[in-house]
Amino acid sequence: MFAQEKPDSEARRDFFGLALLGLTGGGLAAIPLGPAQAAEKKSAAKLEGIFPKDAPAVAAGYSPGIVVDGERVIFVSGQGPADLKADMETQMRQTFDRIGAVLKAAGASFKNVAMIRAYFVNLKRDLPVYRKVRLDYLAKPYPASTAVGVTELDVPGMDIEIEAVAIV
């Protein structure tokens, strides 16, 4: 038994931190723990798009693959729009704005995004709008990207959810 019990959230953070540390062979030991500390550190990440002839990009705004060299990994949980009644372009912009807020709090920006995954309740209708909007947010080399059609999302009435992975 531990000499001093930790709250569940702190124990979970310690567990995941140690798990990530183990997966990287100790390479994450210098990760600042708080967003304020993370914001102080400048990004040293280098992203390089991969464009093999046998796996071309289907549309603008993403790379078939991306090689990243950096020190910290930021996982942005699925985000959705603030106004579920707005038109889809507005909903997508609101969703990207929320992702941007999470990235900023961690000391990153859209230029650090290496992978983005979008989930659509109406893929056929919304994918063309998404492809247009993402060009206003994402930077070259564009991140690797996946778009998935789903039957429903966690929040009732939500038609789009986007998650991201950034490296700084």
Image (cartoon, helix red, strand yellow):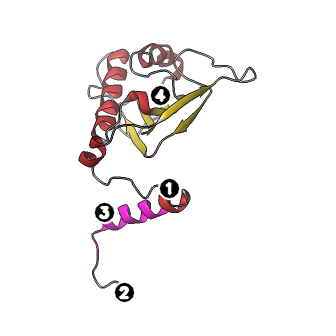
Instruction: Kindly check if marks 1 and 2 are in contact, taking CB atoms under 8 A apart as contact.
Output: no
Callout 4 secondary element: loop
In front: label 2 or label 4: 2
- Does the magenta portion include 5? yes
| Image quarter (top left, top right, bottom left or bottom right) of the N terminus | bottom left
Query: What is the residue that sits farthest to the left in this orientation?
Result: 36
Looking at the rendered structure, which numbered label has been put on residue 119? none
Q: Does residue 96 appear in this view? A: yes
| Mark 1–mark 2 distance (CA, rounded to whole Å) | 29 Å
Where does label 2 land, which residue? 1
What residue type is disc 2 on? Met
In front: label 3 or label 1: 1
Query: What is the residue that sits farthest to the right in this orientation?
Result: 54
Q: Where residue 58 appears, x then y in whole percent?
A: 63, 17
Where does label 4 land, which residue? 121
**First of labels 4, 3 by sequence position:** 3
| Image quarter (top left, top right, bottom left or bottom right) of the C terminus | top left
| Mark 3 Cα shell of 10 Å, populated few (<14), some (14-19), many (≥20) | few
All told, the count of numbered labels is 4
| Mark 2–mark 4 distance (CA, rounded to whole Å) | 47 Å
In front: label 1 or label 2: 1
